[in-house]
Image: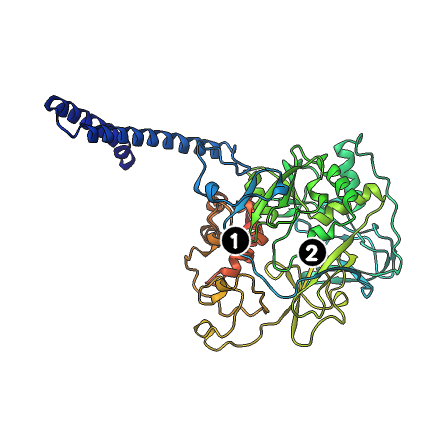
Amino acid sequence: MRSGIVRTFPLFFLVLASNEVSAQSASGGSSSYFIYALIALAIVIFLYIVIQVADNLLAIEARSSNADKRGVNLGLFPGVKDIFAGKAPSYTRDAHVTVLHQGHNILLEGEAAHKLEAATGVTTYAVQPMNFRGILPIPKVVVEPGQEVKAGDELFHDKTKPEIKFVSPVSGEVVAINRGEKRAIAEVVILADKTISYRSLNAPDLQSCTRETLVNFLMESGAWPMLRQRPFDVLAEPGVVPRDIFISTFDTAPLAPDLNFVVEGKGALFQKGLDALAKLTSGAVHLGLDARSAKAPSAVFTEAAGVQKHWFSGKHPAGNVGVQIHHINPINANEKVWTLNVQDVISIGALFVEGHYNAARVVALTGAELQAPKYVQTYAGANMGELVAGNVKDGNIRLVSGDVLSGSKKSPQEFLNFSDDQVTAIGEGDYFEMFGWLLPLSLRPSVSKTFPNFLFPSYKFHADTNTHGEKRAFVVTGQYEEVLPMDIYPQHLFKAILVNDIERMEGLGIFEVIEEDVALCEFVCTSKQPLQEILRDGLDTMREEA
């Protein structure tokens, strides 16, 4: 009703002014110029409203038809963000840059120095079935303690999908098959040889082979578990042809490894991996590129062929592949997309270039509790304690496989998760803080204005795991929306999960997110809610329903 009045007001004003002009002309009044000015102003306002309505309708239609999936403004006029957006770096070559305005960077001490060393002290590696969501907790183990294996030899397979092999990352002796709760297989442990030997593979020719042949080869070689499927972030289904495949070439999580450094000298392997992935999808392989700094990303990424490139700029979680999917081409109902990490692409490429399964990994050892944070060359599933042996400061330290937001707590006897390329050593926050936030005695990572962090935007914190408070009532704060650059309502989504409202969960976008996407929401949560755990419960529920 209100919009109708606004739109008809200029017309009413125009008629009224016209009558006034006629009267003034008849009387020869001196205010004719003023009336003419008012008429001109009314016409301008009327035309502006017409154009603005047309612009809004065009934008709505673009969104409804998914025509604006790449973040390009398809309206008649630039928006406020377009007008005041900074100039894109020259290395983007005038390509569109998606600028994300929500998010938060957590700056911590302990960034890995750009120096690569061999992890000579690591002797044991493990493949952990629980790292592969979507398989049974008790797979069929085909090796036994004391058996010798080569890198690429099968260790176990899922009983429901025996064609997908889970293989050894190194050669050596199987020394343990450890079990967890309900006798689930926790890990198959291998004592590595000093010199790694590999099972030879006959890779098909990518130019002539069929998709079916390629899929069978990847399952037999052991590389298939590197592919993850969304929604639900589960092991990719061999019978599914994904709509698209997405790879993020940069990581914005706290102390995350610099992937430009990681891929140095591996351009040929990365490109061959992309070539293989292109045959697996009916759509395209998408690369998310980093446009945040003045220095261009590695040429391995920017000059990659046969892919669609998309530039992103913004704070964490701009580097999350889930956020990039949302802004490139969101996941709709009944659609499947696949994702994988940069080093997984390199491993797939090695199958065709080197002729064997190569699980080599560059791992960033990070955190303020390390004496010398650095990069090390090792293999997937390396022992955590051996990775940081002799490099940890005294005190009660927590080791994390991954980053501090979404990583997994590990003991020194446990192993790096299959997809992780980072170890974080952080102080255990097992102390009581008198009066908590009432007496902010020291700076700490926080978005709260109680602490003057905003005055020191480049300050790096020496943080620990203390939550500085207990779980509280789940109140509406609007904090999640400020750090999640996605067009969803996270607070409403989490509450729908808690009450098990299937329809609302689907309508509120649960298919677009996984734990790492909401990890920052959990960090800023005033209510101290375990949001990642809540989301996983919801995803598992939706998967069972599907």
Secondary structure beneath dot 1 equals loop
Q: Is residue 19 left or right of residue 226?
A: left
Q: Is residue 159 visible?
A: no
Residue 412, percent from left and from top: 72, 68
Q: Is residue 406 visible?
A: yes
**Residue 470: % across, % down:** 49, 69
Q: Residue at x 47, y 66 (%)?
A: 452
Q: Give whichever of discs 2 and 1 has the lower sequence position.
A: 1
Left or right of 459? Residue 440 is left
Q: Residue 406 or 46: which is nearer the viewer?
A: 46
Crowding at dot 2, Cα within 10 Å, few <14 / some 14-19 / many 20+, comes out as: many
Identify the amino acid type marked 1: Gly
Q: Which residue is mark 2?
A: 420
Q: Quadrant of the C terminus?
A: top right
Q: Which residue is mark 1?
A: 103
Task: Determine the image quadrant of residue 338.
Answer: top right
Image quadrant holding the N terminus, namely: top left
